[in-house]
Image (cartoon, rainbow, N blue to C red):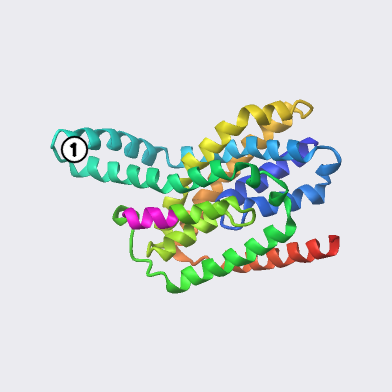
């Protein structure tokens, strides 16, 4: 892998991690177009992607740092005050959102650990699977746009919304689904506004991406012994910068527009991937 390829992977990771068009589908397509399988093993490619995902984790943490601090401090204060029989509306709201994020993370944590070997197997590289899930979740996102009430803002979210979005996030373990795509669709199905669904999606991604990245980091670095550390660092930094811009763009976009453009794009890319899969069969 050369520096240009590393930069391109960083750009693709940063763009597609948060915009609901599937990072896995685009990264695998990029890997094949760049011929990375000729210079790296499948395990090394997977390890490289696992490390540069930490760049997008940094992006979402930086973007939401104010919210993260408010939620974290409020979670501690709110629970302490509750134990003491006192009430503070501001701390209680922050504590409540903190609990919703925790509850929403449990489903993907449980399923991810139980199905780890299956998720990391050849299944994740199948163009048939990726193309199909790109199309299926495009249609589900379209259905969510159609039937969702889009009335509930983030401060009005409750246990029901957290569980629906949390279960939806589990499907992100299937390549081609898109973590942001599944969770935003879940939020819309739960009646959340587009912006609220996106913000909750991004907040929910922090523990999921963070836990996955930390657990895989040591093993990933051991597999990347023959890969330039300069390329790895540059790709991670690029993914962080592009990821930050992608978050800002999507939240601003969803204040005024639907997800229709992403739905159409997913359908087209899904069809392309299925055509490639049938041709290479």
Q: Which residue is at the front of the view, 29 or 231?
A: 29
The C terminus is located in which quarter? bottom right
Quadrant into which the N terminus falls:
top right
The residue lying at 46 percent from left, 51 percent from top is 201
Residue lying furthest left: 85
> Relative to 244, does residue 267 appear above or below in the rendering?
below
Q: Secondary structure at mark 1?
A: helix
Q: Position of residue 190 (x, y in %)?
A: 39, 63
- Residue beneath the point at 46% across and 54% down: 167
Judge whether 253 appears above or below 81 on screen. below
Taking the magenta stretch, the answer to whether it contains residue 159 is yes
> Which stretch is magenta?
158-165
In which quadrant of the rendered view does residue 45 lie?
A: top right
> Is residue 161 at all visible to an observer of this figure?
yes
Q: Is residue 249 left or right of residue 154?
A: right
Instruction: Answer whether residue 58 is visible to the viewer in this image.
Output: no
**Quadrant location of residue 193?**
bottom left
Choose between 281 and 98: the one closer to the eye.
281
Task: Name the residue nearer the viewer: 164 or 148.
Answer: 164
Q: Residue at x 64, y 42 (%)?
A: 117
Q: Which residue is at a point 17% across and 40% down the rendered structure image? A: 88
Residue 9 rendering spot, x and y as whole percentages: 70, 43
Question: Is residue 228 within the magenta segment?
Answer: no
Magenta region, mostly helix, strand or loop?
helix
Q: Residues within 10 Å of mark 1 (few under 14, many from 20)?
A: some
- Tell me residue 261's x, y (percent): 58, 67
Residue corresponding to mark 1: 82
Left or right of residue 267: residue 64? left
Check the image and report above or below for 225 versus 138.
above
């Amino acid at each position: 892998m050369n520096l240009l390829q590393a930069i391109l992977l960083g750009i693709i990771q940063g763009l597609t991690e948060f915009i609901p068009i599937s990072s896995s589908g685009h990264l695998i397509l990029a890997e094949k177009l760049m011929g990375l399988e000729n210079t790296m093993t499948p395990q090394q490619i997977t390890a490289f992607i696992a490390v540069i995902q930490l760049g997008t984790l940094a992006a979402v943490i930086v973007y939401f740092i104010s919210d993260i601090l408010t939620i974290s401090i409020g979670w501690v204060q709110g629970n302490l005050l509750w134990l003491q029989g006192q009430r503070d509306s501001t701390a209680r709201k922050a504590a409540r959102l903190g609990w919703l994020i925790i509850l929403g993370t449990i489903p993907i944590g449980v399923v991810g650990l139980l199905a780890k070997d299956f998720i990391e197997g050849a299944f994740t590289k199948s163009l048939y699977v990726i193309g199909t899930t790109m199309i299926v979740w495009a249609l589900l996102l379209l259905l969510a746009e159609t039937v969702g009430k889009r009335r509930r803002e983030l401060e009005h979210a409750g246990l029901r919304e957290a569980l629906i979005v949390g279960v939806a996030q589990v499907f992100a373990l299937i390549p081609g689904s898109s973590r942001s795509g599944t969770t935003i669709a879940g939020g819309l199905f739960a009646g959340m506004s587009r912006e609220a669904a996106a913000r909750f999606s991004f907040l929910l991604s922090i523990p999921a991406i963070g836990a996955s990245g930390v657990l895989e980091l040591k093993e990933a670095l051991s597999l990347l012994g023959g890969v330039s550390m300069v390329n790895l660092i540059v790709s991670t930094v690029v993914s962080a910068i592009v990821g930050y811009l992608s978050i800002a763009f999507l939240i601003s976009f969803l204040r005024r527009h639907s997800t229709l453009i992403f739905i159409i794009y997913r359908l087209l890319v899904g069809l392309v991937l299925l055509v490639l899969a049938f041709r290479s069969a």
